[in-house]
Image (spheres, helix red, strand yellow):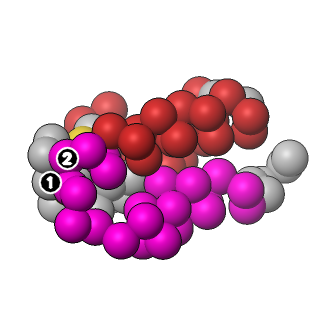
Amino acid sequence: MFGDPADHEPDRPSWDCRACGRPWPCDPAREQLAAAHGRVELAVLMWDHLEEAARDMPQAPASELFERFLRWTDRPSGGH
């Protein structure tokens, strides 16, 4: 893992992770977000982030933003 999981935050307007430089939410950020929120709350939060990212990156295809910000929230995680 790269640094403290709490450091895996988006760097706007690129929405790359401040800690590891990968597109946010990176795997450590996803783990942290999933652990902190229920599935519905997580999906609503990530929808808000998707809307913010769409404003910051108007050239990004909507389908890519959906995959990046929302698709993963529908995957069952361990123990759920």
Q: Which mark is residue 56?
A: 2
Assess whether residue 38 is covered by the magenta stretch: no
Residue extent of the magenta highlight? 53-75
Residue 21, visible in the rendered structure = yes
Instruction: Say if 43 sits above or below 76 in the image.
Output: above
CA neighbours of label 1 inside 10 A, class few (<14), some (14 to 19), many (20+): few
Residue 37 appears at what percent x and percent y? 64, 29
Q: Nearer the viewer, mark 2 or mark 1?
A: 2
> Which residue in the protein does label 1 denote?
14
Front one among 57 and 73: 57
* Amino acid type of the residue that numbered disc 1 sits on in the rendered structure: Ser
Instruction: Say if 80 sits above or below 16 in the image.
Output: above
Q: CA distance from mark 2 to mark 1?
A: 7 Å
Residue 20, visible in the rendered structure = no
Is 9 left or right of 80, judged from the image as shown?
Answer: left
Quadrant of res 39: top right
Is 5 left or right of 59, judged from the image as shown?
Answer: right
Front one among 77 and 64: 64
How many numbered marks, from 0 up? 2
Could you tell me which residue is drawn at 32 percent across and 32 percent down?
6
If the image is split into quadrants, where does the N terminus sit?
bottom left
Task: Determine whether the residue tagged by mark 2 lies in a helix, strand or loop.
Answer: helix
Assess whether residue 68 is covered by the magenta stretch: yes
Front one among 57 and 34: 57
